[in-house]
Amino acid sequence: EVQLVESGGGLAQPGGSLRLSCTASGFTFSNYEMNWVRQTPGQGLEWVSNISISGSITLYADSVKGRFTISRDNAKKSLFLQMNSLRAEDTAVYYCASGRYCTHDKCNNAAYFQKWGQGTLVIVSS
Amino acid sequence: DIQMTQSPSTLSASVGDRVSITCRASQSTRNWLAWYQQKPGKAPKLLIYQASSLEIGVPSRFSGSGSGTEFTLTISSLQPDDFATYYCQQYNGYPWTFGQGTKVEIK
């Protein structure tokens, strides 16, 4: 069974930091680009960040660029999001989600989010 | 950024109804468009990818159509399990963006 399990959410103060983790099972994690997607209360979905299968290429939404860092550990089938300089507007449920399937240096065009975790809630408040 | 606009925002319908949701993009996304279903407290679930391809395990009453800037998700005969919020998402270019969602409610 495919599973993505997030952890690390909680309450943080404005300007503070949190580190989210996502552990994968049931599929070949190292062959998939991975993403973080967030959903703010009462609002829609926002893609946050993407990482290549090797971890060498990372992409960020403008809203988090320079503050958040995505990383992965393929040996541990884990994805991470280091969130620094947190703001109230970062309050959201954060989901990890699979992206494109890749082998060696080629990826398919399937940049939709097929596999999702259950989400972890981040609240930024004083 | 490519802006995705869904209509309507809310749709009231009855079991057995045929319903359609429209998603318009601010510029062409070719056919790189996905649809998701989300129920309260749950993660989104992929229904359709590449505008019209049905994800494995998704009932055939769901279908997708369109290309370029206008796309449609159709549920041919609404079932009780289908009352949820639906989102479109373009993956033609970064940043990937979602529509604001369409809530399908019981009439």
Image (cartoon, coloured by chain):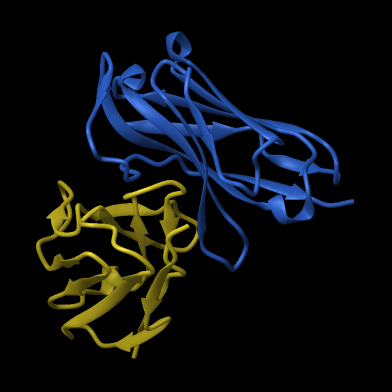
Rendered residue at 77%/43% (across/down): A86
> Is residue A88 rendered to the left or right of residue A58?
right
Q: State left or right for residue A40 relative to residue A114.
A: right
Identify whether A103 is placed above or below B40.
Answer: above
Which quadrant holds residue B70? bottom left
Q: Residue furthest right?
A: A126
Question: What's the residue at 46%, 36% (across, down)?
Answer: A35
Near-viewer residue (B51 or B10): B51
Q: Is residue B30 above or below residue B5?
A: above
Visible residue check, residue A31: yes
Q: Is residue B80 left or right of residue A37?
A: left
Q: Return the residue nearer the eye: A64 or A3.
A: A64
Residue B60 x %, y %: 9, 62
| Picture coordinates of residue B48, whole percent (x, y) | 21, 56
The part of the image, by quadrant, that contains residue A64 is top right
- In this view, the residue farthest toward the top is A75
Of B28 and B105, the residue lying toward us = B28
Q: Is residue A92 above or below residue B74?
A: above
Seen from the viewer's position, the closer of residues A83 and B104 is A83
Q: Colour of chain A?
A: blue
Residue A32 location (% of width, % of height): 33, 26
Chain letter of the yellow region: B
Q: Point out the image quarter for the N terminus of chain A.
A: top left
Decide if residue A1 is in sight here: no
In the rendering, at what x and y percent does residue A2 appear?
A: 31, 31
